[in-house]
Image: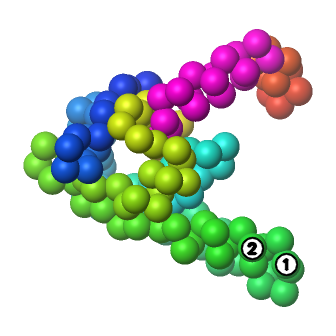
Amino acid sequence: MFYGEYEHSIDRKGRLILPARFREVAKEAGVEKFFLTRGLDRCIFMFAEEEWRSQEQKFKNLSFTKQEARKFNRIFFSGTAEVVPDRQGRFIMPQYLKDFASIKKDTIIIGVSNRIEIWDIDLWRESYSNSRNSYEDIAEKMIDV
């Protein structure tokens, strides 16, 4: 659904723009609302509403008697913000999410199939650099063709 890498900056009003290609995909799928939350690896996860509901159901089914499940759900759900991009695709990202992901101004917005990830540009470059050298090794361990 969402694919590619796009560089965007947070404007002086604190807005980030959803890449045009992602807006097109969302429009074709009838998506108006997105959910932002604390992601993994210090990025922000952004889900279209239908995908958010699917993920939400999975996490709600984790046993609340398990300490790790409680910790994860607290951090994941307490960090959630609903956003509806304006006509130009702009939305305001809450400060606590920007702080979590160390985002100041420049970002990389990447499509990861069923979700979007928003990264501080320097953290993305570091993560990409650290991962690309082991890409083939990771594929060999994970993918059984």
Residue at the limit of the structure toward the bottom, as seen here: 65
Which region is colored magenta?
118-134
Residue at the limit of the structure toward the left, as seen here: 87
Gap in angstroms between the C-alphas marked 2 and 1: 6 Å
- Foreground pick, 109 / 42: 42
SS at circle 1: helix
Residue 98, image x, y percentages: 45, 51
How many other residues sit within 10 Å of disc 2, few (<14), some (14-19) or many (≥20)? Answer: few
Residue that numbered label 2 is attached to? 71
97 on left or right of 15: right
Residue 143 in the magenta stretch? The answer is no
Q: Is residue 58 above or below residue 51?
A: below
- Foreground pick, 27 / 97: 97
- Foreground pick, 17 / 61: 17
Q: Residue at x 24, y 33 (%)?
A: 20
Q: Is residue 103 above or below residue 47?
A: above
SS at circle 2: helix
Please state which amino acid type lies under the numbered disc 2: Lys
Residue that numbered label 1 is attached to? 67
Residue 27 shows in this picture = no
Residue 86, image x, y percentages: 15, 53
Q: Residue at x 66, y 43 (%)?
A: 41
44 on left or right of 23: right
Task: Name the image colouring.
Answer: rainbow
Residue 39: mark: none
Q: Number of callouts in the render? A: 2
Please state which amino acid type lies under the numbered disc 1: Gln
Q: Residue at x 55, y 54 (%)?
A: 100
Image quadrant holding the N terminus, namely top left
Tell whether label 1 touches label 2 (CB within 8 Å): yes
